[in-house]
Amino acid sequence: MSDLIRAINLVKRFRSLRVLDGLNLAVQENSVFGLAGPNGAGKTTTIKILVNILRPNAGRAEVLGVDSHKLGPETFAQIGYVSENQETPEWMTVGYLLSYLKPFYPTWDDARAAQLIRQFDLPLDRQLRHLSRGMRMKAALASSLAYRRRLLIMDEPFSGLDPLVREDLIQGLLESAGETTILISSHDLAEIESFATHLGYLDGGRLQFSEEMTSLTARFREVEVIVDSPPLLPLDRAWPADWLRPETAPALIRFVATNFDPERAPAEIRGVFGEVRNISAHPMPLRAIFVTLPGTERKPRLRSIHASGLAYFQERFPIFEV
Amino acid sequence: MRQVWHIFKKDFRYLRYEVSVVALSAAAFAILHFLHPRAGLLSDALLYEVCLLLGIVMLMGRLLLAEPISGDRQFWVTRPYRWKSLLAEKLLFILMFVNVPMLLAQFFIVTGDGFPLHSNLAGLLWSQVLLTFLWLPFVAFSTLSAAKPYQVIVFAIMLLFGFGMTEGNGPLSGFGWLPGFLMSTIVFVTGAVVLYVQYRKRRVVLSRFLAIAGLFTVFVLLGALPLPLFYAVQSRFSKQPELGSSIHMTLGHGSSEAFRLKSDRPRVLLEISGSMQGIPVESEIHADAFVISLHSPDGGSEELECFNSKPRRTSAADPTISFGCFSNSVFFNRERDQPLSIHGSFYFTLFGDAQSRTIPLTGQTVDAGGGLRCSVETVVNGRLVQCNSPFRWPDRLIYANLGQTTDVNFTLPVSYSPFPANLHIEPFETRLASGDLPDVTIIAEEPLVHLRRDFELRDVHLTWTK
């Protein structure tokens, strides 16, 4: 599959602040790429460069095979862009916004537009300035889904929205997923976890990590090993490099296996710990995976769990079972 | 073209109130010209000019901010807009709802006052060209930032220019139109380039640089362009250049007594007189400019500020000339005891081919020739003549012969601009003169040739006179 978006060594500075520092990114056709990262990581800047709102200081980006700073009307007719911080012509009514945009898009579909209006419960005769933030986002999304596009780029579309509106928007997105490549940025992993097929984690102006979602969730496991005697960490035996965040409690060892293979894992664990009483492996939510990854940690982690430390661990990993 | 029309309809819907304000103000301005209602705020043409200008400024500001160029949050940049369509739409919208109302108002005023359209069409159209020369750079510079305070400042400056245009006294006299034309052309071209770069590429930093460079060029040229250059251009417009060869100038009589100094610090007034020979009969000389400098033997020099000090016309019958120049008293006191040399150039225009027309005392406006329409009324102390010239005062010396006249302000200033209009909302330039003769004669003389005479006087001793 070809890449609809490619960014190569993007650098963007705002005065002395280096927001992007050699960013490389590739988004495959028909994927839903979640671009995650903390606030201020450079997600919005990356997207603004991709849609030719900003120019990079160095590097280049291609969108639909076109250099991003040469994107013209023919390309934009195949792109939808929805952003939390985009100004809208607030004097327009929802109905007028849609009818105004229609002639710009040769593939505009009136039936699809009508369906989106119903689905999002949009009041056609109300001016955008009189809509709530959630409704404005719905109107913006409807105006970007009512035509056949190859690419939909969304910048923090769910930020600050109530859960019901968020569900509506996600539902609208899911219906168009598969026919459209989607790049969606968010600082909240839970927002994009349910429908992203690929994930990238942006921090410090670089993409720290980019992977297919199924592979990512399949290879990460929170492994719990119950042993007879309390172990001490670090062990004198060789510790596999892909076992991260080892933590101990009496008769218990936990770590995150970053390349978990259910067939090979028992033998590997016994090879390190000797005889063990029980081994259990638990899937991890995205948030936990990202906290585990090198370069994504925001705080120093505990190295040893004692009785009082369990609460901490359970708080950080809600599905963790003891 | 379809996209241009599509955006145009959207902007009309968005700005219908501003469009209405401009259209109604222009209509009221035109209607008021014919109604001559009794005094009162609503009968003041200035009120409608102010409404018109405010409406225009609001219209332009909001029109451009509908699709702002500067910034990183505007909705339209990620939509399939064609930059040519957007730029064409903005320009078309302004032409349609700023220039056309102005053009129609001026058309009705001028033709309604009896001026034939065919002889004033050029002025009517050129006044719209000048209006475009005014608004286009402001429109361009307003795209350099989307910040509201910046927009307010840009359009406030435009408003000030507009008021200056409304209340101004026409162009600079003589060659003055040339630097004005040059500067406004540079500003216009700068604005056009900025508009192109902004709409084509949205390169705000580059555009700001271009705008600053253009304005800086104007600023530098304002002080650097020499008068001889303007003369060289202006002399190409001479209608009868062959007349100039016979005209010579003599200054003083070869002695210092011609140069009289009057007191008063910190400046010293230097009076220079002389005469012109070879002036053709029934023509006269009008002084345009003097460029004179004093030079001492030790290399010191000073440029003088000079003016024509002869109240009467210089002609074959009275060929004398005199002009006064101000010298810095420090320079004068330092150099007064040694012989000085005076270098100078006298720029003047020969006027002739006079045509006269007598205006009857009927109070009615009649054709006075040369594009003028005049009327004469009886007032308490004699006669008052009022002449209207559409779009600009003619490039002629026009005298109102009313006996004991006060016609200096009637005749001058005169601009040699070849263009058929000045930048005004009011489509007439009106001048008044009063006198006591029963009949009023309007005399118009054409500029025949623009001339320059250089001179150098050596071993001049400056002395005080009382």
Image (tube, rainbow, N blue to C red):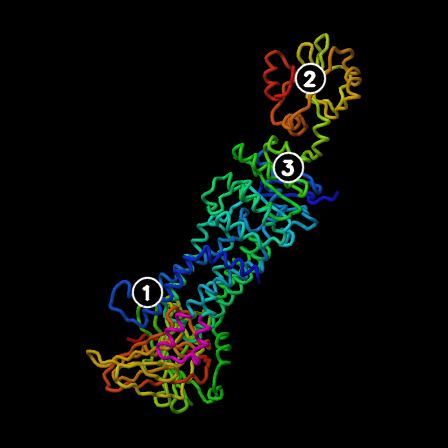
Going by the picture, which residue comes out furthest to the left? B380
Whether residue B344 is visible, yes or no, is: no
The residue located at (63%, 38%) in the rendering is A174
Which quarter of the figure has residue B43? bottom left
What residue does disc 3 label?
A35
Above or below for A196 versus B162 = above
Residue B415's label in the rendered image is none
Q: Is residue B416 left or right of residue A262?
A: left
Q: Are marks 2 and 3 on the same chain?
A: yes
Q: Main secondary structure of the magenta part?
A: helix
Q: Is residue A133 left or right of residue A40?
A: left
Q: Which residues are magenta?
A: B104-127
Disc 3: host chain? A
Which quadrant of the rendered structure holds the C terminus of chain B?
bottom left
Q: Is residue B406 left or right of residue B419?
A: left
Above or below for B396 versus A25 = below
What residue does disc 2 label?
A254
What amino acid type is highlighted by mark number 3? Answer: Leu
Residue B125 magenta:
yes
Disc 2: host chain? A
**How far, Cα to Cα, is label 1 from label 2?**
85 Å
Residue B46's label in the rendered image is 1
The image position of residue B319, as x and y in percent, is: 37, 87
Residue A153 magenta:
no
Which quarter of the figure has residue B131? bottom left
